[in-house]
Image: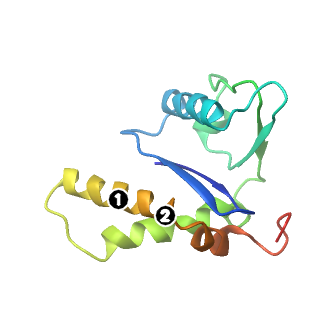
């Protein structure tokens, strides 16, 4: 799962892919850049941890996207980290019959969270974040 949040507005986007890898990250970055209209005249800055697929030499950063890496071992500084519990709780506190049912629940929860910017904002807009 890949997630993007805008702490100031609470807007969020979720990408469910079968794996986490540099190749998958490149696909998500490209799609995200297109959807956010990043490019000439618009820079979108992404704050990322230093996961291997974020820092790989094979990572292709689209035009108009900037990557800002957090210090090592600092998940408390990453706003999106605070949203995982909002997603995990749906499956951690219930039962599923199979993997398909699991992903169906996760997908439904992510779709719901995208309609809840105030909830996302309340979890991601730290007092020290710009606009917080």
Q: CA distance from mark 1 to mark 2?
A: 9 Å
Q: How many marks?
A: 2
The reply, left or right, for residue 113 in relation to residue 64 is left
What x and y, as percent, mark residue 2?
52, 47
Q: Is residue 65 above or below residue 40?
A: below
Q: Nearer the viewer, residue 74 or 85?
A: 85
What x and y, as percent, mark residue 6?
69, 56
What x and y, as percent, mark residue 120?
60, 68
Residue that appears at 31% across and 77% down: 93
Rendering quarter of residue 104: bottom left
Q: Which residue is mark 1?
A: 108
The reply, left or right, for residue 132 in relation to residue 104 is right
Residue that appears at 41% across and 45% down: 16
Q: Is residue 124 above or below residue 103?
A: below
Q: Nearer the viewer, residue 7 or 37?
A: 37
SS under mark 1? helix
The reply, left or right, for residue 45 in relation to residue 14 is right
Rendering quarter of residue 109: bottom left
Rendering quarter of residue 65: top right
Residue that appears at 66% across and 69% down: 121
Residue that appears at 42% across and 57% down: 111
Q: Which residue is mark 2?
A: 113
SS under mark 2? helix
Which circle's residue, 1 or 2, is located before the other in the chain? Answer: 1
Residues packed near mark 1 inside 10 Å, few (<14), some (14 to 19) or many (20 plus): few
């Amino acid at each position: 799962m890949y997630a993007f949040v805008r702490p100031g507005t609470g807007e969020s986007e979720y990408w469910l892919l079968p794996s986490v890898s540099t190749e998958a990250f490149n696909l998500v970055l490209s799609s995200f850049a297109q959807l956010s209209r990043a490019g000439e005249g618009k820079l979108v800055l992404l704050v990322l941890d230093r996961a291997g697929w974020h820092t790989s030499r094979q990572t292709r950063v689209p035009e108009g996207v900037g990557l800002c890496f957090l210090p090592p071992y600092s998940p408390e500084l990453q706003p999106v980290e605070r949203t995982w519990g909002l997603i995990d709780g749906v499956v951690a506190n219930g039962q599923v019959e199979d993997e398909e049912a699991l992903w169906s629940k996760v997908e439904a929860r992510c779709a719901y969270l995208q309609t809840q910017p105030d909830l996302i904002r309340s979890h991601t807009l730290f007092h020290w974040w710009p606009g917080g």
